[in-house]
Amino acid sequence: MKRELRKRVQGLRKATPLDACLERSTRIVELLSTLDVVRRAKTAALFWPIEARHEVDLRALDAALRARGVRVAYPAVVRGETEDERTGLLSFHFAAQGDLEERGFGFHEPPLDAVAFPALARDLRELDVVIVPALALDPAGQRIGYGAGYYDRALAMAAVVKVGVIFDFQLVSEVPAMDGDVAVDWVVTDRRVLRSVRAEELCAPSTGGDRDITGEGVVTNTETPCRS
């Protein structure tokens, strides 16, 4: 089922013109900017878009975060000696956009220079929020990626708020959950913001109620104070 979902959503996204993807990405950035866990963050991890795959583009969010003094990290793919490490692990590094480079994976990532770009602790406790790419998400925060498991392995060790971002047509009713899958706490599309079931356990009850700030989708309890 995951393979079929992955194939179908990849086809839908690839068929969406790049200018439409950019317009949708702009709306996602706007909605992310209203989300309390992002507004309060002092450190955040983003990702560089794989443009050939029409991914969500968060480069405008990078600029907005840095303008208010947020430290921004990006993931790098690291290979090592163990089976998991040979498959590839994500190592997050604080880095400026200009320092990122393409290293064969189709996106820009920090150079693996441990002096200039030290890796964050494996539990990522230096990060307040991680923005996570996805091919599909469901309202419970279950996620489908490209199948290599990079983010699942990294986030399994992370006591950090996780926000998945997708275009609205990538939101599905249910993603099959498997051992090792890591759900996100929030789902943000170009039309709505959803708080996942797991986030209900992490967040205190909101006093503001639900708000529709798009005219089309619902932003749920945006003022809820979450904690990692």
Image (cartoon, rainbow, N blue to C red):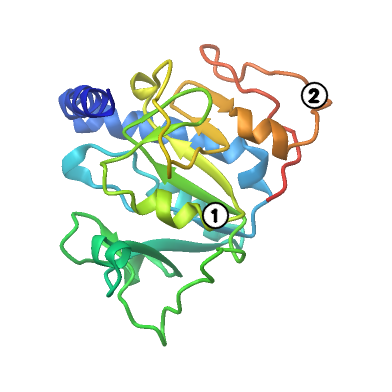
Q: Is residue 45 left or right of residue 51?
A: right
The answer to whether residue 47 of the structure is visible from this angle is no
Q: Position of residue 94 (x, y in %)?
A: 47, 69
In the displayed structure image, the side of residue 69 where residue 164 appears, left or right: left
Where residue 208 is drawn, which disc sits there?
Answer: 2
- The residue that appears at 51% across and 68% down in the rendered structure is 122
Residue 30 disc label: none
Where in the figure is residue 217, as x and y percent of width and height? 53, 15
Quarter of the figure with residue 42: bottom right
Which sits in the foreground, 5 or 30? Answer: 5
Percent across and percent down for residue 208 are: 80, 24
Position of residue 205 in the picture relative to residue 81 (left or right):
right
- Residue 107: quarter of image: bottom left
**Residue sitting farthest toward the top:** 216
Q: Which mark is residue 65?
A: 1
Which residue sits at x=17%, y=25%?
11
The three-letter code of the residue at mark 2 reads Gly
